[in-house]
Amino acid sequence: MQEDLRRALKKPMEERRWGSVLDLRKCVGCHACNIACISENKLPPGVVYRPVIEEQKGTFPNVSRRFMPKPCVQCDNPPCTPVCPVTATWKQADGIVVVDYERCIGCRYCITACPYAARTFDYGEFYTEGTPSIQPYEKVHNFEYGKRWVRTEGDSPVGNARKCHYCIHRLNRGMLPACIVTCIARAKYFGDLNDPESLVSKLAVKPNAFRLKEELGTQPKTYYLI
């Protein structure tokens, strides 16, 4: 995947089409991807970019569990963008749906419009609120979208809608998204869907691949293998 990434970054932005493949047969429900995402993007309480849904199947004593990572599916036809009254969210030329924290007014129309529940709202909370003091690690700034955000100064993204963005700040430096590299089961794949030689392109056309809610016409760029 690293080679696929380097090859894609040599192309003009509009010729790339970032996408991912999640192999449900391999996912063990460890939540490492979710924890890595929270750590990388310093996500506060209530803000989650890639939850892992757990489901119990069967009846006792023949019971098993199934795990399903559920990040933003990065739609090619995203229903969340046209409802924004201030055009604070849009799809980039490379296919990543992004949010401009400085423009977002916190109306949450996009959260309602998303059929995948992939967006959450930042209320400006801290995990250690209500304790003798808010811990310093919660006040550390983060670098989403390549910019420095300081929560303690009331800066964005507090009061904004937030979502997965494939760790753009990492991609621009030639690194894979944090969730991909931390998957202990190697169940997650990322790359350029416009590159027929990339691993994600080869996996996305497998007969056992599917996408969530394709009937809505959203054209998601996240595929699942079963």
Image (cartoon, helix red, strand yellow):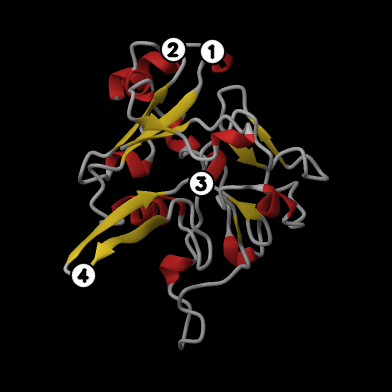
Q: Residues within 10 Å of mark 4 (few under 14, many from 20)?
A: few
Q: CA distance from mark 3 to mark 1?
A: 25 Å
Question: Residue visible at 33% across and 39% down?
Answer: 180
Q: Nearer the viewer, residue 212 or 113?
A: 212
Q: Are marks 2 and 4 in contact (CB under 8 Å)?
A: no
Which corner quadrant of the image does residue 191 belong to?
A: top left
- Outermost left residue: 61
Type of amino acid under label 4: Phe
> Which residue position holds label 3?
143
Closer to the eye: label 3 or 2: 2
> Which residue position holds label 1?
15
Expressed as whole percent of the image width and height from the top left, the position of residue 6 reads 36, 18
Q: Secondary structure at mark 3?
A: loop
Left or right: residue 56 compared with residue 19: left
Q: Secondary structure at mark 2?
A: loop
Mark 2 / mark 4, whichever is N-terminal: 2
> Which residue position holds label 4?
60
> Which residue position holds label 2?
10
Q: CA distance from mark 1 to mark 4?
A: 51 Å
Type of amino acid under label 1: Glu
Q: Residues within 10 Å of mark 3 (few under 14, many from 20)?
A: some
Mark 4 / mark 3, whichever is N-terminal: 4
Closer to the eye: label 2 or 1: 1
Q: CA distance from mark 4 to mark 3?
A: 47 Å
In the depicted structure, whether residue 79 falls above or below residue 69: above
**Quarter of the picture holding the C terminus:** top left
